[in-house]
Amino acid sequence: MSLTGSDLADSIRIDMNFPTPTSTQLIGWGKGVVQHIQTGQVDHALVTGDTAPGAPLANGAAIGGIISGLDGASMASLVQTEAGYPNVSSELSAFCQEIVNHIQSSGLVNFDPGQITGQCTSTPLSPGPLTNGAGTGGIITGLDGNTLAGAIHGSAGYPGSTSPELVTFCTAIVNYVMDNAEIEYTPGSVVGTCPAGGGPLQGGAATGGTIL
């Protein structure tokens, strides 16, 4: 799995019942959003797993990771460039800022048991660090189209209540991200201590994860 701008644009077109083919402007929109999301960083304050002396980490997992490093103005600038808009409008700024806010405030990253790996350097008598700790196949959860649409509606200053079209647009974005983004920790990004004789991983954490 991975995010691509053209696929996001296609998802929006399908859900919004726009005509085919997907417009170059909408593809540019998708590219700008995806390119910026992929600059984000993921961190986990807690990584769990079962250790044994000199053995690979078993059942390595991590839940509730946070996403950071995103910026609404940077996303808006990318969308403007990719979509060919003459400038960054206040409406585009509101859209992108709220997309970023929603991902960073509501998005959670989870790795199922077995998706966090590493090698224990402990012995029956001495603890040792987890080495080559890594993660693959993490997913983003917690995003909601209605919540995002409501935030954009308020930030953009639209009158009345949130429109069904805006809800559909936002739902297409968040569902695509949750269904297709994959989170990865490169070897060495996941750390912890394997206790003497084995047992639960101690002090497990992960930093600098990437969004694919």
Image (cartoon, rainbow, N blue to C red):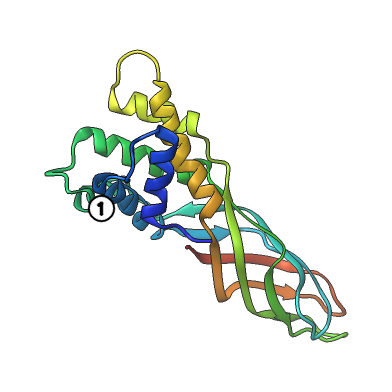
Residue 189 position within the rendered picture, expressed as x and y whole percent measured from the top left: 56, 72
Q: At 36% across and 25% down in the image, what residue appears?
A: 153
Q: In which quarter of the image is residue 25?
A: top left
* Left or right of 111 in this view: 2: left
Residue 155 position within the rendered picture, expressed as x and y whole percent measured from the top left: 32, 28
66 or 94, nearer to the observer = 94
Location of residue 121 with respect to 136 vertically, above or below:
below
Please rate how many residues cluster around mark 1, counting C-alpha atoms within 10 Å: few if below 14, some from 14 to 19, many from 20. Answer: many
* Residue that badge 1 annotates: 78
Quarter that holds the N terminus:
bottom right
* Left or right of 109 in this view: 104: left
Residue 183 position within the rendered picture, expressed as x and y whole percent measured from the top left: 54, 61
Q: At 47% across and 35% down in the image, what residue appears?
A: 171
* Left or right of 18 in this view: 142: right
Residue 31 position within the rendered picture, expressed as x and y whole percent measured from the top left: 32, 54
Q: In which quarter of the image is residue 17?
A: top left
Q: At 24% across and 33% down in the image, what residue appears?
A: 91
* Left or right of 110 in this view: 66: left
User: Outermost residue toward the front?
Assistant: 20
Label 1's element?
Answer: helix
> At label 1, which amino acid type do we have?
Leu
Location of residue 44 with respect to 56 vertically, above or below:
above
